[in-house]
Amino acid sequence: MADKARVTIREVAERAGVSVATVSRVLSGNYPVPPATRARVLRAARALDYVANAHARALVGGGRKMVAVVLRQVTSPFYAQVAEGVEAEAAANGWLCLVGTTGGDPQREMDFVQLMREEGARVVILVGGVVEDDAYRERVAHYAHALDAAGARLVLCGRPSPDPELPALVVVFDNEAGALAVTSHLLSAGHRRIVFLGGLPGNTALDARVAGYRAALAAHGLPPEAAHVVDCGLGRAAGHRAMAELLKGEREFTAVFAGDDMVAAGALRAIADAGLRVPDDVSVVGYNDIPLAEDFNPPLTTVRTPAEELGRSAVRLALRDPDGTAGTDHVLGTHIVVRGSVSPPPSERTP
Amino acid sequence: MADKARVTIREVAERAGVSVATVSRVLSGNYPVPPATRARVLRAARALDYVANAHARALVGGGRKMVAVVLRQVTSPFYAQVAEGVEAEAAANGWLCLVGTTGGDPQREMDFVQLMREEGARVVILVGGVVEDDAYRERVAHYAHALDAAGARLVLCGRPSPDPELPALVVVFDNEAGALAVTSHLLSAGHRRIVFLGGLPGNTALDARVAGYRAALAAHGLPPEAAHVVDCGLGRAAGHRAMAELLKGEREFTAVFAGDDMVAAGALRAIADAGLRVPDDVSVVGYNDIPLAEDFNPPLTTVRTPAEELGRSAVRLALRDPDGTAGTDHVLGTHIVVRGSVSPPPSERTP
DNA sequence: GTGAAAGCGCTAACAC
DNA sequence: GTGTTAGCGCTTTCAC
């Protein structure tokens, strides 16, 4: 019962009483064919429920319109939004979209990119911040050159290029500006002791956010020692653990700036578990404005990063620029979304 | 610069000083080749950064190991988890996974399935509840037969088969049992006036949940009129709108059973906006236990549906059963997760 | 206007 | 052990 033979173009031709060339012509629709023959062929194809073999087509046609996205995981709200943007923009242009997940494993990333090369993907999009070590730089350089040699495009999405000379397109957020803005928001509310939760040394996105955080502190005349960054990495669990740990000692902060909204979710839970209230006892801000951030307790003040637009831009750029005029990075703006997780620090409210 | 010629097997053969057949043999690894030649070929392939053309390979090899998942959208936490399960299980077996989204549009669904037939996907997985109208039944029957005729498998995931005779595998949750369980939980807490928010007449998943809800009510000796289902459909926005509407009139309920967690999120917000507290003034339960349900305000009591396992099961089943011994549905168990959104109704607490 | 035929890059018989 | 060759299903010159 398995593997019955697929209907081929030859059978359609026979049934319609024409040659395979004619069938190909009407199906491709890029060649004038008399309405009568055309109808006959179409009828035969319909009757046989014929579907073209995409592989044969791609083989002769030199590849197929396909873009591939590589993410850590689809269950992260942020990545899911980026994927949705890529998928939508690809579909809108009649391109196929393939999403692959790595779980953060470099080997899986390499395997997937290799697979995409075999499949003839014409655009490969790498999404999200990463820690830039030598192995990474080497990997990306290889992807970029290999893809370029095959006439395909590499797009770095949400991360800078490790080397401006690489044939790669890049679309990013201005993480530093976003972080500077939320930190300033906290400072304006009167906070002076703000901890940054979720540092990840070497990670492009987090380093930039930390830089923005430090810049805001400095701009408000605070000394460098005022910065307190906890390098616990990302994820709800990490945020929860790190916050709980922090809450064990003397409380030397009045606000926390979480590296992203998932970290914030974990931190909020830990704070509640400790019997403290947000924002009365401690203020919290996140980053990314994931769809459910407004349902947190309390609704989270955070930085909106247009994730879906990031994905759309990536494919738009790649399709618009088939010959790879790399060079300038495209940067997308972000802005603060004020909700209920920030208030003046306790001391300020009881002068 | 675009579309440079890809390195082919012929070039590797030349460089290694052997025939293409030999190269093919060492690369496929399914044929004994002397270590010396083998090494020479491998070296040549590496030097040229050769990647096989998957299309040529699939063309001669009769298709390629690929499973396709079809979802409404990846940004829904529930669907994302299912997709992750499918992806993981497929990858674990060395299969490619392609995810397509429809946004709920039947046309896009048909286009995507058609595309998957062209691509030679050997497994196509349709995910999630649907409203079963005639058009739908016809569509699915067509997919099932067409896929079967090509030796591929159709898997209905999270929805029953519209016709037991169809050559399709099915994996589902026992929605009725899950709904009966949470409703009973509410009843045990003392609630008698419970509204079901998020009905969607004709939708397989919601109808089953409503049935479980009614069954629980009946089991507790309540008359059929005790049931109150609001057919607002799914999604956070729908839940918010419907709840706000409900709150405008005389409050004739003490608890709400949301059709899924996103509806619950919207309902919680509407309740808070109305100045009411959960669970003191009104209790709320959801369905699915999405990852962030515990971060809602208050943490949501809900029904855990093992979404990722649903996805994994779907591919496991399809791979285990290549010849389509359809017939019996596979059903996955669910269970309640008790958190903070339920308490006895106000009247019970002030006897 | 339509058909015959030459490949696209690869695998698998079939020779030697 | 390794090379030669015939296709896989399709598109696309090039004839007629």
Image (tube, coloured by chain):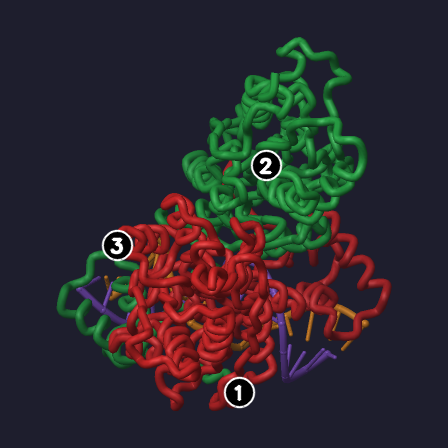
Chain colours: A red, B green, C orange, D purple
Residue A229: % across, % down: 31, 68
Residue B74 appears anywhere in the view: no
- Between A81 and A142, the one nearer to me in the picture: A81
**Mark linked to residue A249:** 3
Secondary structure at badge 3 equals: loop
| Whether label 3 touches label 2, CB < 8 Å | no
Residue B30: % across, % down: 27, 55
Identity, as a three-letter code, of the amino acid under mark 2: Val
Above or below A200: residue B200? above
Above or below C9: residue A37? above
The C terminus of chain B: image quadrant: top right
| Whether label 1 touches label 3, CB < 8 Å | no
Residue at horizontal 67 percent and vertical 13 percent from the top: B218
**Most distant residue in the right direction:** A36
Query: Which residue position holds label 1?
Result: A323
Residue at horizontal 73 percent and vertical 35 percent from the top: B200
Query: Which residue position holds label 2?
Result: B278
Secondary structure at badge 2 equals: loop
Identity, as a three-letter code, of the amino acid under mark 1: Asp
Horizontal side of B177 relative to B339 (left or right) equals: right
Residue A251 appears anywhere in the view: yes
Identity, as a three-letter code, of the amino acid under mark 3: Gly
Residue B271: % across, % down: 66, 41
Secondary structure at badge 1 equals: loop
